[in-house]
Amino acid sequence: MAIACTPLGHRGSGITVAVLDGGFTSADKHYVFDSLRTKNLLIPARDFVDNDWQVCESSSHGMQVLSVMGANQPGVLVGAAPNASYVLVKTEDVRSEYRVEECNWIAGLEYADSLGADIINSSLGYTTFSDKTMDYQYSSLNGASDASKAAELATARGMIVVNSAGNEGDSEWKYVGVPADSKGAFSIGAVDSKGKKAGFSSFGPTADGRIKPDVSAAGARVMSASASSNQIRPTSGTSLSAPLVSGMIAALWSAFPEKTNIEIMDAVRKSGSQADAPDNELGYGIPDFVRAFELLKGKSPARRRAAPRAREPFDRR
């Protein structure tokens, strides 16, 4: 649940979203992405797990995430930003969980920066691992891990790093993970169809007392593309609420390309349903992107980001 600015005609044109995930099976052929492929807005890019260029493999999770943002089949499924460009980057090894995947994530973030990405969508998080000696503790959630510091650096460079808060709210862990704890990450919780916190959505605060998540959006039974049946099915998780917000931020930013990433994030927070009393269940609440649009429209023009994003085609060699 969130209110989009897409009805105002803004659909993400000119914005590049890098999707960091564990695989994008069927993204190269699912019919909901026909529009992206026809317009050359879908770029299967780099696999940092197998060190190759094949990303439409291993898992359909990234494809589901992508569909929430970039699908464009009217009457079936239309994402929040169907006119944005999408770069698909595989960083997660779905066969196991080790900290090397955080290194892959950082490499993916740097790679996305080199391609001029404006927004990072990461429906990934790290708390416990296959090797238990690698496990994080709650005290680790202070933004000081390598991945969390990388997210903070990306924000300083002008990007918006949208990261799922995590699905541990009803587990023993309970809290957000890495890099959702980052000072730079725009962390997204999940609500159900009634606008209440979804039971699985991870809690804040961070170990150093900062409010997380930043905002929350629909994450229970969100319609997304299915790789196995080439159909549309409901799926739940903050993995779905994060791309919903990423897509709407892309639509919002396309309306105000002169605004900085900080101004965009501030407007989204201020549009939240509990902006005056944020908490560690929903953060600043459910964002109203029409309200965010009006907030940005009412401000005086701001300077462009210090380092304009490159738009040149990249070389796969």
Image (cartoon, rainbow, N blue to C red):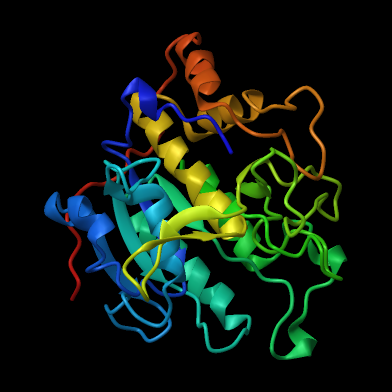
Residue 83, above or below 253? below
What residue lies at 20% left-to-right and 72% top-to-bottom?
A: 316
Q: Which part of the image, by quadrant, shows the C terminus?
A: bottom left
Residue 21, above or below 59? above
Q: Quadrant of residue 224 in the image?
A: bottom left
Q: Residue 312, image x and y in percent?
A: 18, 51
What residue lies at 71% left-to-right and 55% top-to-bottom?
A: 181
Q: Quadrant of residue 149 in the image?
A: bottom right
Q: Is residue 17 visible?
A: yes
Q: Residue 29, image x and y in percent?
A: 22, 68
Is 213 left, or right, of 140 in this rendering? Answer: left
Is 38 left, or right, of 169 in this rendering? Answer: left
Report the front residue among 317 and 38.
38
Is 54 left, or right, of 200 in this rendering? Answer: left
What residue lies at 37% left-to-right and 45% top-to-bottom?
A: 79
Report the front residue among 237 and 99.
237
Q: Quadrant of residue 282 in the image?
A: top right
Q: Which part of the image, by quadrant, shows the N terminus?
A: top right
